[in-house]
Amino acid sequence: MTTYATGNPVPSTEVKDLYDNAQNLDTLVNDRTKLTHPDRLGVPRKTWFGVETQAQLDIAEAVAQATAEADAARDEAQEARNDAVAAAGAIGPIKFYPTKAAATADLPNLENDDLVEVAQDESRGGSRIRYRVSDGALVFEVNLDQLRQDLAGQNGAEIVGSGNKSVAASLALTSGALVVNVDLEYDGDAVAAYNAIPESGNVILLFGNRDYNILSLGSNSKPNVSFRGAKMPRYDPVQKRLIGGTVLQGSIYNTAKGFKVENLGIDRGEWVRQNLANNQYKDTFVNVDFGSDAGISYGDLIILQSEVVSGLSASQTHCLLNERGSGVFQTGDVTVIEGYHGHVVKVQNFYGAGKVTITKHQQGTGVIVKGDPPPANPVSNVFFGHVIIDGTQTRKSAGVLYEAQQQNMVSVGFESIVGKYASYLIVEAAATTGLVVNLTIGYISGEVIDGDMGGIAEAVVIGPHTINARIGDHSLSFCKKGGLRVMAGAIGAQIGNGVSKGAEGVGSQAGNGYTFDADVQHGFIQAFDNAGYGVANNANNSINPQNIFCANNSLGGVSKDSFVLVNGVGWDVAKPNGSAIISGRRIDINLRLTGGTISTTGYGWTTVAKLAKLPPPQEIFLNVFSFANSGAPLPAAAKIMPNGDVLVYSSSTLAPIAFEISGSFTTLENS
């Protein structure tokens, strides 16, 4: 629903429009009943449920059609096989040889009219050729590959009545694209094949299962060009190169709409840099300045960058960079390896829902969503699928960074972020100056996280410029400097059910399970075996004690300045008020009041402070020490009431300088 419906044009930074966008986005992403929902301008949009439903229908239709076609092709193939067997029997036995030289060498053993078939005839371009023996010589009968070669030729489609074009082009009529087989038509010269593409573009380059040197490939400005590989390669960590599939060795730069890359590897790693690229560093795959609604897509990719060395600019070592434009789609899984930055998105309308990004050995960021300062366009509507941060015990990998510089960034989402042996999981960059509105993370899991990103210590950090962060279920284990933190200035943070355990504490970092410097709504959270507090609660009335369980945290369960001074008593407010440490239902109280006086005549009870949360179920007497100006102890008593009031029993004539009150009780509320 749209509450305010201001009708302001896009883009708008009005708070009412941001509110409407947040409401509508929640429905568009999370509703499981509606197929469409209007945006704040009233335009119907498919919900994610609608997209999934349509995809299921399309897939079912495609499967049914493919099954029918496969059945028909199988029947035709069986008929052809039967015909071939019958024909072979009719013309007599055939003797097979791998090459013509082998057949020629065996001529003394052959008789007149024997049929000879050569699998790869070196005298006829490696074609499959059939000969007949006549007077001790091989006489040509037929080129069994002739039809295939004719069909693959430039005018092969004439054979099947499809005009003056290749069969590959004829098969691409549904997409309107010309299909070019780089190996068959350009002998594997990828650069020559690309250079032959007309400026109007609309060409699919088909690559085989081999390496292609593309170091001299220029920037692509031709629209609707596709690079399609035959097989995904794998990473060889010993040679530091991609092997065993379609590998484009070099860099790809694109500035055109409709560019597509799929089912291959792009290698700008150590081996390529040192052996082919004259030791030059350069980004691996870049889409930049391509305009709006570009329709760029990529998927089923593995992208390798060089290791970062001291003094090297981070801008030279992106694995995958999308910058200045809108309309980019991740259509398959992507793995980014080495370099300073992994998968970088600095555009509007990026969609990778359901797909996986694997980051490995990035030094700075595995994934970064970043809005640059004007005149760059603001970044909005960036939705990743699943991010996996894949480090090792000896070599951590960087996580996810989000950053908005001088202008706001709206609607950034991740279906999940999972990491092991990572520098961090997700943090707001320290350089952020604009607002980040509507950050959504469906699930977070991290194990052995160093907490090392620009002075930010915890594994997960919701920064001071973030509005409406939503984190779902989470599990954080052995995060050295701390688990999850919501920094002061963050607004509207919500955290689901989860656990944070085993933070070690390093240097000045205590190693808290959770640190809340701003108010947070949370589900049931558990914190145990942390070197600091289970929950370091530094906000006002932030936590819900009934949804917190803490155990075996070195500094205590929940830390909070939980006492407020009562007006009119005159205690020195500059002194620490005290703390109430929560462990399960047990509340441990420590309270020191200095510099005040007791406003009572003779001996009597006076309220001196109030416990802000979790009062006892009944009146509880506490330990108290009272000291006069001379330093001598004075008689006094203290108690805490069910309403949270802390009272002392003393006399104003004694003019105490300090009360030190301590004790514990069990609350009825489950923390």
Image (cartoon, rainbow, N blue to C red):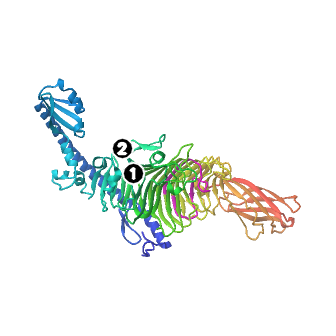
Judging by the rendered image, the residue that carries numbered circle 1 is 214
The residue positioned farthest toward the top in the image shown:
109
Position in image of residue 429 (x %, y %): 56, 60
Q: Which is more foreground, mark 1 or mark 2?
A: 1
- The amino acid type of the residue labelled 1 equals Ile
State the quadrant of the C terminus.
bottom right
Q: Residues within 10 Å of mark 1 (few under 14, many from 20)?
A: many
Instruction: Please give the range of residues in magenta.
Output: 441-470
Q: Amino acid at mark 2?
A: Arg
What is the CA distance from the residue labelled 1 to the residue labelled 2?
13 Å
| Left or right of 580, for residue 547 | left
The residue nearer to you, when weighing 583 against 442, is 442
Q: Is residue 496 visible?
A: no
Residue 623, numbered circle:
none
Q: Identify the residue at the far left of this view.
A: 90
**Residue nearest the observer in this picture, 117 or 390:** 117
Where does label 2 land, which residue? 210
